[in-house]
C-alpha cells in the first residue's frame, strides 16, 4: 500500500484524489490518508503530490505513518474530488516538524 506522510499536513493539495482509480483517500482537518486495504498499489498518486507526501509503505519515511493512515481511514470521510487547497499551502510545503500539527 501507499501511505500519506507528514508533508501533506497543512498542504493538502488534493491532486492525489483525482487520480486514484479506487477512490481510497480519506480527509481530515489538515491532511489526507490512504485506506491500506483499499489501495491497489498502482502508484499513480505518488508523482501527483506537489509536496511529495505519498510514499510506498516500504519507504523509511512511511514507518511512522502506516498505523495513522489505517486508523483515520476508517474514521474520516472519503474524498474523491479536489477541493481548494489551504491559502497558505505553499508556505507549509517542505517545512520540517509538521507532525505535531496533525489534527484528527
Ligand atoms: Fe490510489 Fe493507487 Fe495511490 Fe493506492 S497507489 S492510493 S490505489 S492512486
Ligand atoms: Fe496531501 Fe499531496 Fe494529496 S499534499 S492531499 S497527499 S496531493
Image: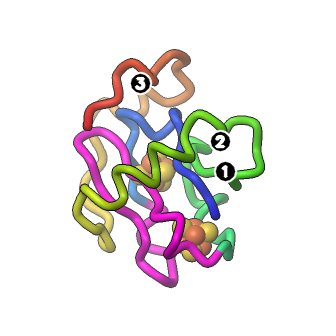
Q: Earlier in the sequence, mark 1 or mark 2?
A: 1
Figure check: 67 above or below 99:
below
Residue 20 disc label: none
Q: Earlier in the sequence, mark 2 or mark 3?
A: 2
Any magenta on residue 1? no
Q: Earlier in the sequence, mark 1 or mark 3?
A: 1
Q: At which x and y percent is residue 71?
A: 38, 50
Q: Residue lying furthest bottom in this view?
A: 21
Q: Which residues are magenta?
A: 15-40
Any magenta on residue 23? yes
Ligand 1 shows up in the quarter that is: bottom right
For disc 1, the marked residue is: 55
- The mark closer to the camera, 1 or 2, is 2
For disc 2, the marked residue is: 62
Instruction: Report how far apart the C-alphas of labels 1 and 3 lie in the structure.
Output: 21 Å
Classify mark 2: helix, strand or loop: helix
Classify mark 1: helix, strand or loop: strand
Q: Residue at x 59, y 34 (%)?
A: 64
Q: At which x and y percent is residue 101?
A: 34, 22
10 Å crowding of disc 3: few (<14), some (14-19), many (20+): few
Amino acid at each position: 500500500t501507499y501511505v500519506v506522510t507528514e508533508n501533506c499536513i497543512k498542504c493538502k493539495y488534493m491532486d492525489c484524489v483525482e487520480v486514484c482509480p479506487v477512490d481510497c483517500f480519506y480527509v481530515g482537518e489538515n491532511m489526507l490518508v490512504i485506506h491500506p486495504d483499499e489501495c491497489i498499489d498502482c502508484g499513480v498518486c505518488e508523482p501527483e503530490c506537489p509536496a511529495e507526501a505519498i510514499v510506498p509503505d516500504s519507504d523509511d519515511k512511511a514507518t511512522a505513518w502506516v498505523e495513522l493512515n489505517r486508523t483515520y481511514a476508517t474514521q474520516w470521510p472519503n474524498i474523491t474530488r479536489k477541493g481548494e487547497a489551504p491559502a497558505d499551502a505553499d508556505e507549509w510545503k517542505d517545512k520540517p516538524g509538521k507532525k505535531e500539527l496533525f489534527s484528527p
